[in-house]
Amino acid sequence: MNLTQKLTQLQENGSAIWAANFYNLETLKGILQASAEMDQPLILQLTRGSIEYMGLKPAVAMARAMIEDYDLRAWLHLDHGDSIDLVERCLGAGFDSVMIDASEQPLAENIKICRKVVELAAPFSANVEAELGYVAKLGQSTEKVGFTKPDDAQFFVAETGVNALAVAIGSAHGFYKEEPRLDIALLKKIREAAKIPLVLHGGSGIPSVQVRAAVKAGICKINVATETKKTFMRNVKNEVLVQEEIDLRKIFPVGIGAVKKLIGNKIKILM
Ligand SMILES: [Zn+2]
């Protein structure tokens, strides 16, 4: 089953899958251990930054090998692809899915770029995710947020042929100063109009009750990234402070275990 089929099925059933970003071997391991223990599939995501950090080939090879080792069902996705060139490289490296994020461009330009990516992904049967409306990036003011308009969504999907749509309904990347309030009524309208799987970015820190309401209303992929970084670093930092240990293989498992617990708790929200 390719990811588009999986997402469509999840949306029909009113359920969703977590899409977790990984940054190194340790965060990857923690995420997959959670998936294995809960016996739930998930999506592994890489951003340009993580690809540049690990190298495209090593990151993909490591993810594929570990998925096989744990005997899991998992898909590999490019998160926030910012250029056609990066999308092409990821498709060539065997990604199951790519996001092209031209959400900061005017609608016509967003459509033009997404149409090109849909064309490139077709021979690979890869899933294509785009963003419409604007979900604030880490460190940006949430005032910049432009909620997705249902009419635009309908037009955008028809014009581009994308398979999944990241929507702006009140979430933001990173952490929230105040509790976020997702606009579920708007989400329902977008679903009616777009008629394709919908994605929620900024999944770190949205209260479980709101996550479940969003899933019921059509969200079938939820991204979690910032919380993983924070959890890993906090735990490793604490461990380094209390021990003289220089063997990183004894320190890092603390971070792996914390990531496993975090993702395990996320998975539980949707079970
Ligand atoms: Zn995002």
Image: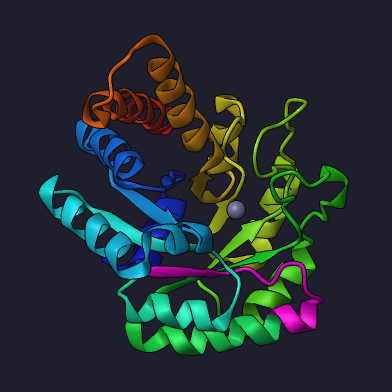
- Residue 147: image x %, image y %? 80, 54
Residue shown at 30%/69% (left/top)?
Answer: 57
- Residue 207: image x %, image y %? 60, 26
The answer to whether residue 200 of the structure is visible from this angle is: yes
The stretch in magenta equals: 96-110
Residue shown at 30%/29% (left/top)?
Answer: 252
Q: How is the image coloured?
A: rainbow
Vertical side of 63 occupied by 119: above or below:
below
Vertical side of 215 occupied by 146: above or below:
below
Q: Is residue 175 magenta?
A: no
Q: Residue 176 falls in which quadrant of the image? A: top right
Left or right relative to 20: residue 26: left
Q: Residue 90 falls in which quadrant of the image? A: bottom left
Vertical side of 244 occupied by 79: above or below:
below
Q: Could you tell me which quadrant the C terminus lies in? A: top left
Q: Could you tell me which quadrant the N terminus lies in? A: bottom left
Vertical side of 62 occupied by 29: above or below:
above
- Residue 108: image x %, image y %? 78, 83
- Residue 259: image x %, image y %? 37, 30
